[in-house]
Each structure stands twice: as C-alpha cells, then as structure tokens.
Image (cartoon, rainbow, N blue to C red):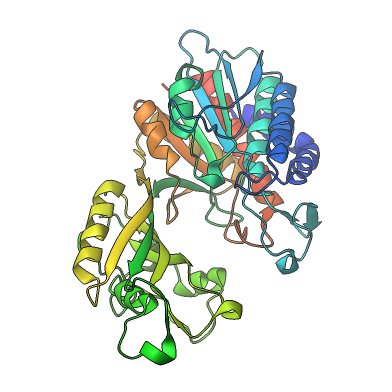
C-alpha cells in the first residue's frame, strides 16, 4: 500500500470520526444487558440499532437479526445477534468482523461519576456502560466498513459480520449459532474487536488468552443448622470447612498450588510492577501475589479467584452454625492446557484436600479453552503493518490474562482462518467496573487500523 493510499484512508477516518462518536453515544444510551432479570426489549432495541448502522455502510445487500436455541433441540433461545455477508470476488479473501452489542450490568449507580447510560465526554474519554466493551468495537467495524466502501467500493473483498448479543452472559448459544450460520460466517480472516491495547499510544495484537474453569463449590458438614452457642467448638460449620479447603488452592505467595495446573512456556515482556499496582488500584503496603515476571503471572500462569459466595451478608448474619456453604471459583488456565484437563486437576485437588470428612461437590461448571495465535501468517503481518501506520507505533504482541471462550469455538469451526484479536480498550478503560470509559484517541486509531487492514486485504489479498 502506497503512502498516498494510506493517507487517503486515514483522512477518511478522521473526516467521519466525530459522527462515529455520536453514533457510539446513541448505542451507549441503550442498556442492553443480556442477564436474566433485565429488560430483554433493550437487547432488541440495541440489535435493531446495530442492524441500521450496518445497513448504512452500503456494504451488504441484507443485514439480519437472528436468534438460535442455546443448544440443538432446546426450547430456550439465545439473544439477538446481527449477521450479514458479502461474497468475495474470485481470488479475494473473506474477512469476518466480530463484536458484541450486549453489556455488563451497571451495578450501583452511586459508584459512577456520570450516569452509566448517559454517555459523557470528560477530557479525552467517553464514559458510559458499554462505551468501550464492546459498543466501541461495534462502531470500529461500522466506521471501517464505511471507509472501505468509500475508498475501494468495487474491491471484491468478502465481508462477513457477526455482532453477538450475549457475550457478557457467557455466549450460551454461540456454538449452535456457528453451526446454524456457518456458511454465512465462513471466512479466511476473523477480526475479533474485543480486547485491550498496551497503552493509549501503543497498540496491542492479542496473541494469547488464558482459558477459564468456573464452578460452584458446595461444602456440607451437617444435616441442618444449629445454634452456635450450643454446638460451636465441637461441630464443624460448613464455612470453616470450605475456607480450609479453599486455602489449599494457593501456596504462601498466592500462586496456584493445585497439582496439574500448568504454566505456559512463553516469555512475556518486562513490565514495572508499580504499573500493575497503579492500574489495579493496589494500596501501598499490600503486596502483589505470585512469583516471577509480573506479566508471566498475568498471561502464562494459572490463577484461582473466589468470585462469589452463598454466605449471609453482614446485615443478615446470625449466631448459627451453617450446614452448607457454596463458593464460586474462577480458575484462569494457561495457554496450552485444555480447560477439561484443568477441571480434572481441580476435581482431584478438592477430593484430596476436603477437611473434616465434609462432603464437597463441584457444580455449574463453565469451561473455556485458552488461545494461542500463529503469528507467522499474512493477515497477522498485514494487521501489524496497519496498526503501525494508524498509531504511529509498532504493535506489541500481547497476552491477556482474561478469557474469550468463544474463540476456541471459532478455531474449531474455521480451523484454516487466521484469527486477529484486536481491541478498543486500554489500561484505563475499567471495563466491567463503574466508570467504564473509551479513550477517543484509541477509538480513532482502532478504526484506522481496521480500515487500513481491510483496504490492504482488498488490494493485496493474503499473498
């Protein structure tokens, strides 16, 4: 791609950027939460808004909203997704663009500095739930497709589109959706716009993701509850047994002590531990956990976190010996180990370490496999070149400690496709937290990177 062509693409991105931000604001105003207990009409409204935006690009003859059962034969349906396809001309590749239009619940509004669904620009950031994760990803695709249509309307590049409606809710119908619509979604390159960047000035191409094993751990010590004054000191309460069991998951440094949970044999770049402390909000005097290079701990080592409990809250606590206690455990799995193998290791550990003869049961298991990118492919090379041109800095090949379980499903369904995990977030985004925000400079650069990628593939293919 010539310098003149690159500049033409970047100018087109910049000319339309303010309008793209206004359209992003319109999406953010829709509280499209897929979790049970929230208004499903808002997801329908969000899907319709995304459909209209995709139609406005002029790329597709038809854009559809589709839902499928969460599993074949199920009577329960997943949430509305938006799909479309433009067939490639002979010899041209097809690119699948993925993002999601559902958002996390917003939690306690008192913790937000601005109303969560009233998008507000403060400085260079746009605040609001879903402003980054992942409605900015949706708008990245919309804006990049408009540039492609403006710069190379007759390029013959094939485009497939999948904007999911339940990623934050566990992508429950994802596998069945791929099976049902695989011909619409079949592609040579897949761009997943749902990840992070190294900073607001340096882009990242995510090349590894940890997997996840999430489960409920229920510990039972009694047939019924008892008065703590009558039996405390002789009768084991379930929280005691559960806490003793949970404590065996970690060594004295806070690293995983579960035999059979593996670490990946990759070397992460150096990062100052103080940067991690600052980004995560670790107070002075509180130490980080684990050992070794800090990014190896975050990207390449397993990590176990307790994320929920059935115990009474402080207001409802009473002097009672509880017969059962349930904790929800999330184990992040290093790239290279299957989530099924990790679950088996955790099951063996629980069986071996449950104290006092208590009964321990693992339930409600959710599995997501890790992900590793082959970085030698032509699409990876084109994406890194596009990022460098858009950002003015070379991309970092980064790992992510979190999981995107559906990527392993994409790998299984389309084994020959190159998967590019890009994103609009940065270390200050606070996705899933109060005061989520999108850095507008990052959004511009993400749009520009994808627009350059699409025009590169349109003119040069994957040769």
- Examine the rendered structure and indicate whether residue 87 appears above or below residue 376: above
- Examine the rendered structure and indicate whether residue 435 appears above or below residue 452: below
Q: Position of residue 403 (x, y in %)?
A: 43, 50
| Residue lying furthest top | 90
Q: Quadrant of residue 262?
A: bottom left
Answer yes or no: is residue 188 visible. Answer: no
Q: Position of residue 80 (x, y in %)?
A: 62, 31
Q: Position of residue 450 (x, y in %)?
A: 59, 34
- Name the image quarter holding the C terminus: top left
- Examine the rendered structure and indicate whether residue 382 appears above or below residue 27: above
Looking at the image, which residue is at 24% across and 77% down?
356
Looking at the image, which residue is at 37% across and 33% down?
411
Q: Quadrant of residue 254?
A: bottom left
Residue 275 relative to residue 223: left or right: right
Residue 408 relative to residue 131: left or right: left
Answer yes or no: is residue 462 visible. Answer: yes
Residue 57 relative to residue 359: left or right: right
Residue 194 relative to residue 270: left or right: right
- Name the image quarter holding the N terminus: top right
Looking at the image, which residue is at 38% across and 56% down?
215
Q: Which one is in front, 161 or 390?
A: 161
Looking at the image, which residue is at 54% across and 69% down?
280
Q: Which one is in front, 362 or 21?
A: 362
Q: Which one is in front, 23 or 339?
A: 339
Q: Position of residue 260 (x, y in %)?
A: 20, 59
How many numbered markers are drawn? 0
């Amino acid at each position: 791609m010539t310098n003149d062509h690159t500049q033409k693409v970047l100018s087109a991105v910049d000319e339309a950027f303010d309008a793209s931000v206004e359209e992003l604001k319109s999406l953010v105003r829709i509280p499209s939460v897929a979790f049970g207990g929230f208004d499903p009409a808002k997801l329908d409204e969000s899907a319709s808004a995304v459909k209209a935006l995709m139609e406005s690009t002029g790329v597709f003859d038809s854009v559809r909203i589709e839902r499928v059962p969460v599993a074949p034969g199920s009577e329960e349906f997943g949430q509305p997704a938006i799909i479309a396809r433009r067939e490639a001309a002979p010899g041209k590749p097809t690119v699948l663009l993925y993002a999601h239009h559902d958002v996390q619940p917003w939690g306690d509004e008192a913790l937000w500095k601005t109303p969560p669904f009233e998008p507000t620009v403060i400085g260079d950031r746009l605040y609001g739930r879903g402003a980054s994760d992942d409605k900015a990803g949706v708008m990245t695709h919309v804006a990049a497709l408009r540039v492609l249509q403006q710069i190379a309307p007759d390029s013959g590049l094939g485009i497939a589109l999948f904007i999911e409606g339940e990623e934050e809710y566990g992508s429950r119908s994802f596998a069945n959706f791929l099976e049902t619509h695989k011909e619409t979604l079949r592609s040579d390159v897949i761009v997943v716009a749902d990840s992070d960047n190294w900073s607001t000035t340096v882009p990242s191409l995510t090349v590894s993701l940890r997997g996840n094993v999430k489960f409920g751990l229920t510990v039972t010590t009694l047939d019924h509850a008892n008065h703590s004054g009558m039996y405390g000191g002789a009768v084991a309460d379930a929280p005691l047994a559960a806490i003793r069991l949970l404590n065996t998951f970690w060594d004295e440094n806070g690293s995983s002590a579960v035999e059979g949970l593996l670490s990946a044999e990759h070397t992460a770049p150096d990062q100052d531990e103080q940067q991690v402390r600052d980004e995560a909000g670790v107070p002075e005097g509180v130490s980080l956990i684990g050992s070794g290079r800090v990014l190896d701990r975050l990207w390449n080592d397993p990590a176990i976190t307790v994320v929920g409990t059935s115990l009474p809250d402080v207001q409802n606590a009473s002097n009672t010996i509880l017969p059962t206690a349930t904790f929800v455990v999330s184990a992040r799995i290093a790239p290279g180990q299957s989530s099924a193998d990790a679950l088996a290791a955790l099951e063996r550990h629980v069986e071996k370490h449950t104290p006092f003869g208590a009964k321990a049961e693992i339930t409600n298991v959710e599995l997501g496999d890790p992900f590793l990118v082959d970085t030698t492919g032509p699409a990876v090379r084109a994406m890194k070149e596009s990022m460098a041109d858009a950002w003015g800095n070379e991309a970092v090949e980064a790992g992510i400690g979190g999981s995107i379980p559906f990527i392993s499903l994409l790998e299984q369904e389309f084994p020959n496709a190159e998967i590019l995990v890009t994103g609009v977030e940065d270390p200050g985004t606070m996705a899933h937290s109060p005061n989520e925000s999108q850095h507008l400079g990052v959004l511009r650069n993400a749009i520009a990177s994808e627009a350059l990628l699409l025009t590169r593939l349109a003119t040069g293919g994957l040769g």
